[in-house]
């Protein structure tokens, strides 16, 4: 892997948990000269020392940028691509951190014109149910995988540079197709979030919801931890990957109903067998 | 709360995680003279020093017992009650640790005859996805709640004694009706387990199940941690509380499908609102 170059002017469109952590990690790794942030949390990110400068207008912020990192909520990205396209330098490199890839790539292809070859789609596999710049951490990506989804048009030098940045921040870049990425993350991330939201929603609307809070043990707390995640971000993610999420949800509901049928029938042997299959797969998960 | 008396001969029918931990905690708190264990894991519990003596036959083990703790899998309890009833001393106290209460109480009422008044149904809210005597820990109950479900027939002195034992082991006893207990734990424990089993089962049967293991992040690991629990124990628990579990599962599946419908419709505003309601309830859970 090539060592990363130092980027003179790096602009973050979005300085929440991921954008803020990436700014802090780039600074810590000596990868950035001047760090600019844009978006509703940029002034807080500046107060926290994550960036050097906060600028309101994205089209102003990205002028003369060497690297633009789109780290805003996924639903804001199509409009951001349109706003910044006219002012991008020819040699700029762009990347993103969105949890869904097909939708973002298609929006970028449509809006960026010739500059689309300079856009390297990326998704670092790191996060937290905490959000905003106050939760930012330069070590967030240490040891994490980062999916990179190069397109046929993607400039090879730009691709290598983005991979070098992630490597320098302690992450391990992996290339996947956008379709493969979206299928995998519907399964390992988007579905578990939907399930945690649904579990919490179904408990929260019970007449005894108040007293349940006092009886919750470690099992419920772990199972629903990610239900505390940002509602707007997750509405975007689930909808941007809706086909794969709906398919995964249907398979999951089918598995629920299969267990439910055995519970209702009182079929201990068959229920225990089904649970054992689930348990044995779970035991193979690290951690 | 009265200080607990010291029990001369304490017999554990079942020495897995809960029985083994309770034996260790009673010994540590100086509550027991001679600790006897019975069941398939009793010899291992003796090797580990959790009990003093392992005896194969429950009817032999409980002879002359001052306190009998039923800590076997729930499906074994009806037969155990029948086996031990003929040999119980008049002054014996019995208790259990099962995660469902109505079924166990009804089995005890049927099998124990006059001795039913000496049976104090209990459920310590502590556990782990680990199981067996090797996972036993005398501190398992420290700070935990323990539900006690006294019946109209329950001897008041026996009730107070069992509450004193739990207090001495660091737990906080709470009295609930069996029905209330079973409704609450269907919601906060049994449903989350069923959900974790279903989530793991639906992912484990995908064609890409192998590669998913490598992409799992903290969200999936937390959401499915309890899916590694003992299959036979959980088949028993879900079936012993089937009415409440089925009702809670149906409400949950309805919540899943409500989210799914909004994902499919691309309705960001309404989806974000639903998620926000779920998130805000989750944020009120301790830990």
Image: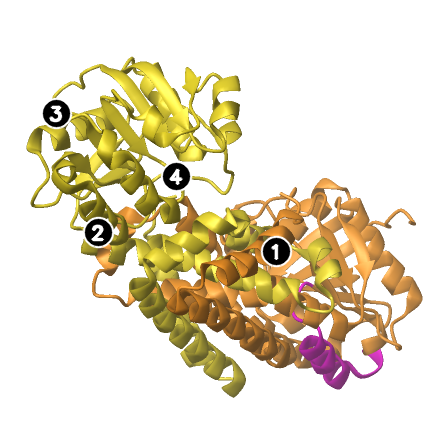
Chain colours: A yellow, B orange
Secondary structure of residue under mark 2: helix
Which chain contains the residue that carries disc 4? Answer: A
Q: Quadrant of residue B177?
A: bottom right
State the CA–CA distance, disc 2 to disc 1: 54 Å
According to the picture, the residue beneath numbered tag 1 turns out to be B18
Mark number, residue A106: 2
The residue closer to the viewer here, A268 or B254, is B254
For the point 39% across and 57% down, the residue is A238
State the CA–CA distance, disc 4 to disc 2: 16 Å
Please indicate whether residue A207 sits to the left or right of residue B260 in the image: right
Vertical placement of A172 versus B140: above or below? above
Which chain contains the residue that carries disc 3? Answer: A
Highlighted magenta segment, given as a residue range:
B97-115
Find out whether the residues at labels 1 and 4 contact each other: C-beta distance under 8 Å: no
Q: Quadrant of residue B89?
A: bottom right
Tag 3 and tag 4 share a subunit: yes
Residue A54 visible from this viewpoint: yes
Mark number, residue A1: 3
């Amino acid at each position: 892997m090539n060592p990363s170059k130092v980027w003179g002017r790096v602009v973050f469109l979005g300085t929440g948990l991921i954008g803020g952590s990436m700014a802090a990690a780039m600074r810590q790794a000596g990868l950035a000269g001047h760090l600019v942030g844009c978006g509703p949390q940029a002034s807080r990110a500046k107060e926290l020392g994550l960036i050097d400068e906060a600028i309101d207008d994205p089209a102003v912020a990205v002028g003369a940028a060497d690297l633009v990192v789109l780290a805003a909520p996924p639903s804001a990205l199509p409009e951001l691509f349109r706003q910044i396209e006219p002012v991008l330098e020819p040699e700029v490199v762009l990347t993103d951190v969105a949890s869904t890839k097909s939708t973002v790539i298609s929006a970028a292809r449509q809006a960026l014109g010739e500059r689309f070859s300079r856009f390297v789609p990326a998704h670092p596999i790191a996060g937290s149910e905490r959000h905003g710049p106050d939760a930012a951490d330069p070590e967030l990506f240490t040891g994490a995988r980062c999916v990179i989804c190069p397109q046929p048009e993607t400039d090879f030098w730009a691709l290598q540079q983005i991979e070098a940045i992630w490597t320098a921040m302690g992450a391990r870049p992996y290339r996947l197709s956008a379709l493969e990425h979206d299928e995998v993350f519907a399964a390992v991330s988007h579905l578990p979030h939907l399930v945690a939201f649904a579990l919490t929603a179904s408990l929260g609307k019970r007449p005894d919801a108040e007293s349940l809070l006092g009886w919750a043990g470690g099992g419920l707390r772990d199972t629903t931890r990610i239900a505390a995640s940002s509602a707007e971000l997750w509405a975007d993610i689930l909808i941007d990957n809706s086909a794969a999420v709906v398919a995964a949800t249907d398979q999951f509901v089918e598995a629920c109903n299969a267990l439910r049928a055995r519970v209702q029938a009182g079929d201990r042997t068959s229920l225990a067998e089904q649970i054992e299959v689930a348990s044995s797969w779970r035991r193979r998960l690290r951690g």
